[in-house]
């Protein structure tokens, strides 16, 4: 599955779609339990590498990357370089 449909964090159409859905009256966009846990880790740490999030949640890295891509499309998280490492942090 990962080879056929890799997670894409940079997808302008997905960002537009997520923002449009959020702006619709009566929309009820909810985040999953895993996404909520990711956001909590980022809040506690101020940002973390995807591998560290994967280890803390005991979830495959590819699954974490897919969840991070979804959160990125909702503009909940973003990537940043810190000391040469790609860090995921809150938007």
Image (cartoon, rainbow, N blue to C red):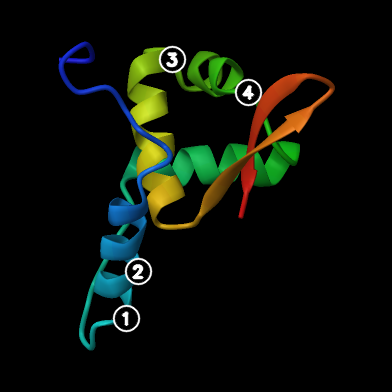
Quarter that holds the C terminus? bottom right
Of the numbered discs 4 and 3, the one sitting upstream in the chain is: 4
Rendered location of residue 57, percent (x, y):
47, 22
Q: Does label 2 or label 4 sit earlier along the sequence? A: 2
Mark 4 = which residue? 49
Label 2: which residue? 19
Q: Residues within 10 Å of mark 3 (few under 14, many from 20)?
A: few
Q: Where is residue 46 in the image (x, y as percent from the top left)?
A: 74, 41
Q: Decide: marks 2, 1 in contact (CB < 8 A)?
A: yes
Residue toward you, 29 or 84 = 84
Q: What residue does disc 1 label?
A: 23
Cα–Cα gap, marks 3 and 2: 30 Å
At mark 1, the secondary structure is: helix
Residue 67 position within the rendered picture, expressed as x and y whole percent measured from the top left: 36, 35
Q: Is residue 84 left or right of residue 15?
A: right
Marks 4/3: CA–CA distance:
14 Å
- Disc 4 to disc 1, how far (Cα)? 30 Å
Residue 15 image-quadrant placement: bottom left
Q: Nearer the viewer, mark 2 or mark 4?
A: 2
Residue for badge 3:
58
Q: Can residue 59 be seen in this view?
A: no
Q: Is mark 2 on a helix, strand or loop?
A: helix
The kind of secondary structure element at disc 4 is loop
The answer to the question of whether label 4 and label 1 lie on touching residues, with beta carbons closer than 8 A, is no
The answer for how far apart the CA atoms under marks 1 and 3 are is 34 Å
Whole-number angstrom distance, CA of label 2 to CA of label 1: 6 Å
């Amino acid at each position: 599955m990962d080879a056929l449909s890799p997670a894409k964090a940079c997808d302008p159409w997905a960002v537009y779609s997520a923002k449009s859905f959020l702006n619709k009256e009566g929309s009820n966009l909810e985040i999953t339990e895993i996404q909520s846990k990711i956001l909590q880790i980022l809040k506690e740490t101020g940002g973390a590498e995807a591998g560290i999030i994967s280890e803390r949640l005991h979830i495959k890295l590819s699954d974490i990357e897919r969840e991070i891509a979804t959160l990125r499309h909702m503009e909940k998280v973003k990537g940043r370089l810190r000391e040469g490492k790609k860090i995921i942090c809150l938007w």
